[in-house]
Amino acid sequence: MAREQMSEAAERSKSQLAYHWLKERIASEELTPGYRLVLGSIADQLGMSVVPVREAIRRLEAEGLVTFERNVGARVSMIDDTQYRHSMEALAILEGAATALAARHLTDDDLRQARDLNRRLVESLDDFDPHLFTAVNHSFHAVLFAACPNPRMRALVDAEWTRLGHLRDSTFSFVPGRAQESVREHEVLLDLIETGAPLPDIERAARGHRSATLAAYLSHEHPDGVTTSL
Amino acid sequence: MAREQMSEAAERSKSQLAYHWLKERIASEELTPGYRLVLGSIADQLGMSVVPVREAIRRLEAEGLVTFERNVGARVSMIDDTQYRHSMEALAILEGAATALAARHLTDDDLRQARDLNRRLVESLDDFDPHLFTAVNHSFHAVLFAACPNPRMRALVDAEWTRLGHLRDSTFSFVPGRAQESVREHEVLLDLIETGAPLPDIERAARGHRSATLAAYLSHEHPDGVTTSL
DNA sequence: GTGTGACGGATCGTATATTATCCCTTCCAC
DNA sequence: GTGGAAGGGATAATATACGATCCGTCACAC
């Protein structure tokens, strides 16, 4: 169905369509890690042949969202503990730098928006919902580094964030106490930015903020805390 | 030709074959930026159909080595001034962090190897060849961050380095004087690592080293130096 | 009962064929 | 001579078809 409706906005090729369709479903957790992605079935669901689907999956594979095994097929990437740790460490570094690079380019409006979002985070602390908290938390940080004038850095941060996907929730699910520290650190970070603190200070604060989240997760998973020491 | 020789080591699928074939040729500058990649021709040269070639190109596209335009085709990515700057900035951040993370894991052997490579760089200063210098320079830094225990960081650094591709040469071609500073900074960096300096110091040195290379390039291209200030 | 081998369904890998799109050239009108 | 439209060649986009590979199951022998 829906095959001849190239009426007007049929901009995207089928391969792009499949790509976005899959990516969206992975992001929304409709397709959970480990889920088997059968080319033929997907092609059927989308009313296209397998060729565009293959290309879409290849692209997702290159982005790390999907893993592929020869002659066996694709499945949504599983991120294990170790990978999670490594990815979070990378994100801490990237996001810290991006936030610092953005600091001098944030408008009053941006900062107001960030404070609003953090206020929402504070409010959500009663009646705590890890999923919602994670989402708003993302928005908060997104506002901060969106002003980063280096598009390459923004792309890297985005990619890493997507890669971590829903796994991000887990920290706040497992260690709810971390959420409270988190919002306090947000305030500190905003203050630093607003008062025009030296960029290295801002970078350190932003990086430390995410490292602390990682540490909270690790200390929950592996009570024999191994600390990362950058 | 060479079509039925699946005698023994035919491990890789054709799509992987095409991927590596192309990537190698791009890295070796046999295919220069802007070069038009015609699916059919490549398929013919490799003795396969276009389908695997498409997949290979899709993957290269996701990695940023190739740009694709709908209904028009693929070409080897051009990196302009602006992108170069952004990518170098990202590399400075990533490589700096990776080097710091690696510092405590470098063996005596690694350090010896690094010093050897830097010695070769010093020697090559007379009779200067930018291309050779860049290659050895890469090896030097590769030794340093190869010991980084975070594979995600290593992957990101590698990807960024590949992305910059041959463009790296240009700095040393345009600003030969930078090479001399560079090797001196290498010594400083090695000393810091060997004496067990604090990791933030090492990171700062490594990042600053690359930022300085970028600055040298920029001040050559745009004599009204805009400095990056992280 | 257990191990081994063969069969078959499911799915992937690739080739070939068909259709759609773009771009360049040519031709005609003014 | 110039602008614009029509046509054709090249190439990409997708569909279909076929062969290859894997994996689970069943049967048979020991």
Image (cartoon, coloured by chain):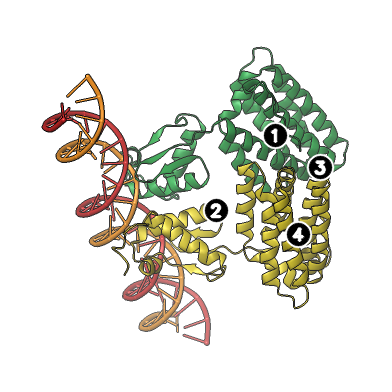
Chain colours: A yellow, B green, C red, D orange
| Residue type, mark 1 in image | His
Q: CA distance from mark 2 to mark 3?
A: 30 Å
Please state which of the two labelled residues, at mark 2 or mark 1, is closer to the viewer: 2
Q: Residue furthest top?
A: B127
Q: Nearer the viewer, mark 4 or mark 2?
A: 4
> Which residue is labeled 3 in the image?
A200
Query: Is A183 rendered above or below residue A191?
Result: below
Residue matched to label 1: B141
* Residue A63, numbered label: 2
Q: Is residue B166 left or right of residue B35?
A: right
Find numbered disc 1 in the image and state the secondary structure of the residue it sits on: helix
Please report contact status of discs 1 and 3: CB closer than 8 Å, yes or no: no
- 2 or 3: tag closer to the N-terminus: 2
In the rendered structure, which disc, 3 or 4, sits on the residue that comes first in sequence?
4
First along the sequence among labels 4 and 2: 2
| Residue at left offset 84%, top offset 38% | B201
The one of A83 and A122 positioned closer to us in this rendering: A122
> Where does residue A11 sit, x and y in percent of width and height?
38, 53
The chain to which mark 4 is attached is: A
Circle 4 packing at 10 Å, graded few (<14), some (14-19), many (20+), is some
Tell me the kind of residue under disc 2.
Glu
Q: Nearer the viewer, residue A203 or B11?
A: A203
Q: Quadrant of the N terminus of chain A?
A: bottom left
- Answer whether labels 2 and 3 touch (C-beta < 8 Å): no
Above or below — where is A60 with respect to B102?
A: below
Residue C16, horizontal then vertical, whole percent: 23, 51
Residues beneath discs 4 and 1 located on the same chain: no
Tags 1 and 3 on a common chain: no
Determine the image quadrant of residue A81.
Answer: bottom right
Which structural element holds mark 3?
helix
Circle 4 sits on which residue? Answer: A115
- Chain under label 2? A
